[in-house]
Amino acid sequence: MNVVDILREAIASRRTRFAFELLPPLKGDGTGGVFAAIDPLTDFDPAYVNVTFHREGVKQTRLADGSVEEHVVRRRPGTVGISAAIRKRYGVEVVPHLICGGLSKYDIEDALIDMDFLGLHNVLALRGDKSKSERSFTPHPQGHAHAVDLVRQIAAMNRGEFVDGEVEVCHHSRFSIGVAGYPEAHFEARDITSDIAHLREKIDAGAEYVVTQMFFDNRRYFDFVRRCREAGITVPIIPGIKPLSTLRHLEILPRTFSVSLPEELVREAQAHPDAVREVGIAWAAAQARELKEAGVPAVHFYTMGRTDNIRKIAKAVF
Ligand code: FAD
């Protein structure tokens, strides 16, 4: 069953499902860390597991003769492989993320063909962020400038159309496509109205559901959903929740993800500097409880690889 069918079933049965997102292992690590992060969460019958995709970076090595060698490397490669390993081990649906950044349409097509062969029929289609060396996001010369173009490529492949114009009649992939949405607007967007208009383009191009950027005040999510519905977006909009876990998050999360933190949460964290993880768990559990009561089909937890806090939240809510 693909993710959109799981979501439709959740809506029909009025059951809010638990879902979470993981990072692939750092290069050189095996699968053990990822499996250890998933194991404590299997009790909560996850609807699906997302696996992030990480873009390449440039590493410089100084050689003995003084010259500099550049290596184009990915610190966390293997999104497709670990997704297939998770699916096989746990029998759960897995959603590999796929980005435009640093990839040509041909690279993307190859990755999609691998995913199809491995039984991965879900994908979260994203643009990705600029690389460290860029001032702003620059598409690959043979790649895509926006996530909507990636959605179009995947939807075309589902119809048997490949990037070189070849049309394949005997086998069609059947990817269920999700995309990202931003309750507080994407940081590059002119405003929330234009951001939602671009979100609508992704849906019109074939995306079947939306996963939101993290937010810490549920009113942001409810308001976003209302605006999306007014803009004609009818697909499920899955709230993304990230529990605060360190004092540094107070500064890092707003800067990195262009999100705001409610004053009350900031005050609580600052008042309990040795127990920020517990503060974050209580806050995220309250958010998830309210979202569940509001009847959302799933809550998507950002784990960043550590899941002890997510387990406590899931135990309290699901
Ligand atoms: P887009 O939809 O292309 O939007 C980017 C900006 O361009 C927005 O401001 C939008 O309003 C604007 N825009 C869109 N279409 C057009 C158009 N046609 N013309 C003009 N402007 C347009 N990043 C990773 O690198 N790896 C991941 O695994 C990853 N997972 C994520 C998961 C979720 C749930 C979310 C919310 C984000 C994730 N990201 C990930 C981050 C994401 O890649 C960045 O936020 C990126 O900057 C934007 O991606 P997008 O898919 O929203 O882009």
Image (cartoon, helix red, strand yellow):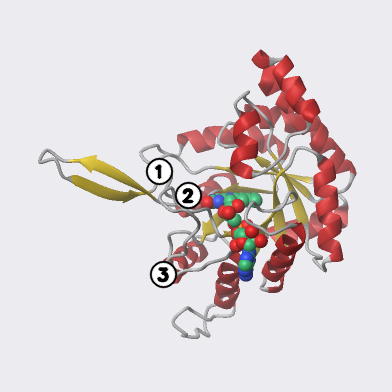
Q: Residue at x 80, y 51 (%)?
A: 297
Q: Which mark is residue 141?
A: 3
Q: Is mark 1 within 8 Å of ligand 1?
A: no
Q: Is mark 2 within 8 Å of ligand 1?
A: yes
Q: SS of the residue at dot 3?
A: loop
Pointers 2 and 1 in contact (CB under 8 A)?
yes
Residue 140, by quadrant, is bottom left
Q: Quadrant of the C terminus?
A: top right
Looking at marks 3 and 2 on the same chain, the residue that comes earlier in the sequence is marked by 2
Quadrant containing ligand 1: bottom right
Q: Is residue 20 positioned above or below 275 on the image?
A: below
Q: Quadrant of the N terminus?
A: bottom right
Q: Is residue 312 left or right of residue 297?
A: left
Q: Which residue is mark 1?
A: 75
Front position among marks 3 and 1 = 3
Measure the alpha-carbon separation of dots 3 and 2: 19 Å
Q: Which mark is residue 54?
A: 2
Total marks placed: 3
Tell me if I can see residue 252 in this picture. yes
Q: SS of the residue at dot 2?
A: loop
Q: Amino acid at mark 1?
A: Arg
